[in-house]
Image (tube, rainbow, N blue to C red):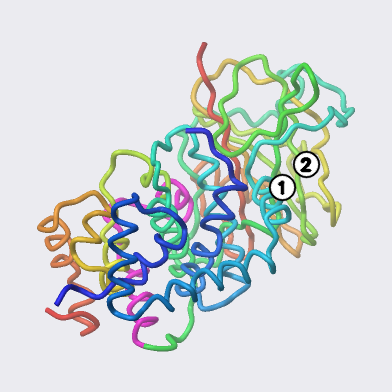
Amino acid sequence: MAMDIDHLYRAFGPMVHRRCLRMLRDPEKALDAMHDVFVEMIRHRDRLHDGAPAGLLLRTATNVCLNRLRTERRHPEDRDDELLLAIAAEPDETPASRAVARRVLDRLFATQPVSTRLIAVLYFVDRLTLDEVAAEVGLSVSGVRKRLRGLQTLREKGLVDA
Amino acid sequence: MPDPVSDWMVERLAAGDLPADDARRVRAELEARGELGRLDAVLSANRTFLEAHPPARVVAEIERRGGPRRRPWLLVVPVLAAAAVMVALVVPRSSAPIVVAEGSDVVRLKGQQPYLAAYRKGDEGADRLRDGARVHAGETVQVAYVAAGQRFGVVASIDARGNVTLHLPEQPGAAYELVASGETPVPHAFVLDDTPGFERFVFVTSAHPFASADVVDALHGDKPLPPNLSLTDLTLEKEIP
């Protein structure tokens, strides 16, 4: 798929920025993160086969922001923020030390399973339906439910229902 | 009653990302609920955002951070044979990532922070190499840094066999006092050898002096990088013909 970054930005840049702003709560940080989301798209242009890129951009933006939230230490502004920070702190299924953090983003474009943290953000924070989450991440609804049941830490903190 | 139309669907509708049938369905649902204003609000916000952040400026910044760019081969530096450029720190080790102390403040830097750029000499000038670019033995690569105000720095690389090379400074010792602004090439370009795998360049910076040994030890996996140092990196993937 040929990548026209100008077209992608015009069509989806505002959406990506809103996504980053919602997660990072800071317009400058959101703008910076937005740029990095599109850099990731360029980086993996060879592997893009998606005629509807919004979902890929949403997942990329979410993971870019989750990685940044992981190193931030800020007081949550509201319950959604508290939930986001808790999700960001959740250990990912795949090992990701800071030194290899970037490689985690590569998994979005490979055949490895989508992260449970991403699923948690889409469902608990974005309040997508199970069907919508399943469609975005390429899992069945039961697969999404199973992943969400595994979020023990969030349940223990009382941030999500048991 | 059907589920409400999610904000996500409204975003996709506004961006033209939905297949035609789905777009009609979502629009009809919004209209039935008297919620077409949500779509108008997103479209209006999109226009406002693009006016404040024009595509020409943003796309240029995106490409500067990691997209492809060609520019004339302006880096007139001596091209030495790989053996002459290699600093005597060739100690075969495993190719572990640079060690970062758990809980340290070492951060990955992007955007308006210090960064590395790499260029491959081509027939019509220099090709900018983005992170993950494929390169081949025999190609000539010039690395440059942008200090973004940091005072001291070390540029080093490690290959798949664990061989570490210092590029700036070229000899072990104190970190180099950096040129504060603009893109500055390291002293020498180099010719890639035939070691397969990758060549990972790291740029470690600080506002205060430090030793190049801190970086070399971290690349070897002997010690974590001290927490007061900042790290950015760029990896070139070696392709075997």
Contact between marks 1 and 2 (CB within 8 A): the answer is yes
Residue at 69% x, 66% y: name it: B51
Q: CA distance from mark 1 to mark 2?
A: 6 Å
Secondary element under disc 1, as helix, strand or loop, is: strand
Residue at 82% x, 52% y: name it: B178
Q: Is residue A90 magenta?
A: yes
Which amino acid type is shown beneath numbered disc 1? Answer: Val
Residue assigned mark 1: B154
Mark closer to the chain start, 1 or 2:
1
User: What label sits on residue B169 in the rendered view?
Assistant: 2
The magenta segment: A79-104
Provide residue B181's location: percent of width, then percent of height. Answer: 85, 55
Q: Is residue A6 magenta?
A: no
- Predominant secondary structure in magenta? helix
- The residue lying toward the viewer, choosing from B164 and A120, is A120
- The residue lying toward the viewer, choosing from B86 and B31, is B31
Q: Residue furthest top?
A: B241
When the figure is inspected, residue A78 is found, relative to residue B23, above or below; the finding is below
Provide residue A48's location: percent of width, then percent of height. Answer: 43, 38
When the figure is inspected, residue B72 is found, relative to residue A42, above or below; the finding is above
Indicate the chain on which mark 1 is placed. Answer: B
In the drawing, does residue A53 fall left or right of residue B212? left
What is the crowding at mark 2: few (fewer than 14 residues within 10 Å), some, or many (at least 20)? some
In the drawing, does residue A11 fall left or right of residue A54? right
The answer to whether tags 1 and 2 share a subunit is: yes
- The residue lying toward the viewer, choosing from A139 and A81, is A139
Which amino acid type is shown beneath numbered disc 2? Answer: Pro
Residue at 80% x, 62% y: name it: B149
What is the crowding at mark 1: few (fewer than 14 residues within 10 Å), some, or many (at least 20)? many
In the drawing, does residue A30 fall left or right of residue B85? left
Provide residue B219's location: percent of width, then percent of height. Answer: 55, 43
